[in-house]
């Protein structure tokens, strides 16, 4: 399937989820994440904030858990058509962007490039780690400018079952995909299903 076809299909699939299902599936995703990945104090995690109208994976509880564990948390903000990374804490004030994304009030780019984990939004990932987002390319650009050892982790309600026909060389693949039932690795290590 093409990215356009996949975008349409998975946008529709998401629309069928109730808000309760979104919250429950999001909890399962982050439970899998916390079981699979070793987190420790002072690590640096870049994590998107969800667009609730688009029924994205809800990262709010996960971010709160990271902050409780004294992990440094950075979130994206679009400034002058570029994705910057803003460090947040429990007292950070947020405002909604014109896309409906909660963003920190601050426009101060942390300049951080060395993340342990980058939690990446997506509509779909295939079983090679190729992702389909909303087509703006913000995360591909962002991923090209951070330490290549930063683990890029997609989170999705749906397991891969379609191939993406129109992947191109500028697309940056994920290292892992976490779903409510599995953690899939696209690197040298084998996938670990939690089914």
Image (cartoon, rainbow, N blue to C red):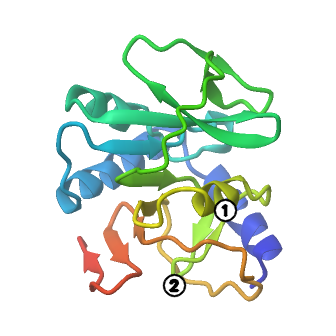
Q: Position of residue 24 (x, y in %)?
A: 37, 44
Residue 41: image x %, image y %?
A: 18, 37
The residue at which mark 1 appears reads as 140
**Which residue appears at 58% of the width and 60% of the height?**
143
Quarter placement of the N terminus:
bottom right
The answer to whether the residues at label 2 and label 1 have Cβ atoms under 8 Å apart is no
Q: Marks 2/1: CA distance?
A: 16 Å
Q: Nearer the viewer, mark 2 or mark 1?
A: 1
Structural crowding at the residue carrying mark 1, measured as other residues with C-alpha within 10 Å and reported as few (<14), some (14–19) or many (≥20): some
Q: Compared to 31, does 175 lie above or below?
A: below
Q: Secondary structure at mark 1?
A: helix
Q: Residue 98, labelled with which disc?
A: none
Question: What x and y, as percent, mark residue 117?
Answer: 38, 54
9 left or right of 156 in image: right
Which quarter of the rendering shows the C terminus?
A: bottom left
Side (left or right) of 138 relative to 21: right
Q: Which mark is residue 128?
A: 2
Residue toward you, 101 or 108: 108
Of residues 24 and 150, the one drawn nearer to the viewer in this rendering? 150
Residue shown at 23% from the left, 70% from the top = 194
């Amino acid at each position: 399937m093409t990215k356009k076809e996949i975008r349409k299909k998975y946008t529709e699939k998401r629309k069928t989820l109730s808000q309760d299902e979104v919250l429950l599936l999001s909890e399962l995703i982050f439970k899998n994440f916390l079981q699979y990945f070793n987190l420790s104090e002072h690590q640096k995690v870049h994590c998107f904030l969800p667009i609730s109208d688009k029924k994205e994976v809800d990262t709010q509880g996960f971010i709160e858990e990271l902050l409780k564990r004294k992990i440094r948390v950075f979130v994206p903000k679009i400034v002058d058509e570029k994705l910057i990374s803003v460090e947040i804490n429990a007292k950070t004030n947020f405002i909604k962007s014109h896309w409906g994304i909660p963003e920190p009030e601050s426009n101060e780019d942390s300049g951080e490039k060395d993340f342990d984990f980058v939690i990446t939004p997506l509509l779909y990932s295939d079983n090679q780690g190729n992702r389909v987002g909303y087509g703006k390319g913000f995360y591909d650009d962002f991923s090209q400018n951070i330490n290549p050892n930063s683990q890029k982790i997609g989170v999705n309600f749906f397991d891969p079952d379609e191939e993406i026909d129109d992947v191109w060389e500028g697309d940056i693949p994920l290292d892992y995909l976490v779903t409510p039932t599995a953690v899939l690795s696209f690197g040298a290590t084998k996938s670990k299903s939690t089914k």
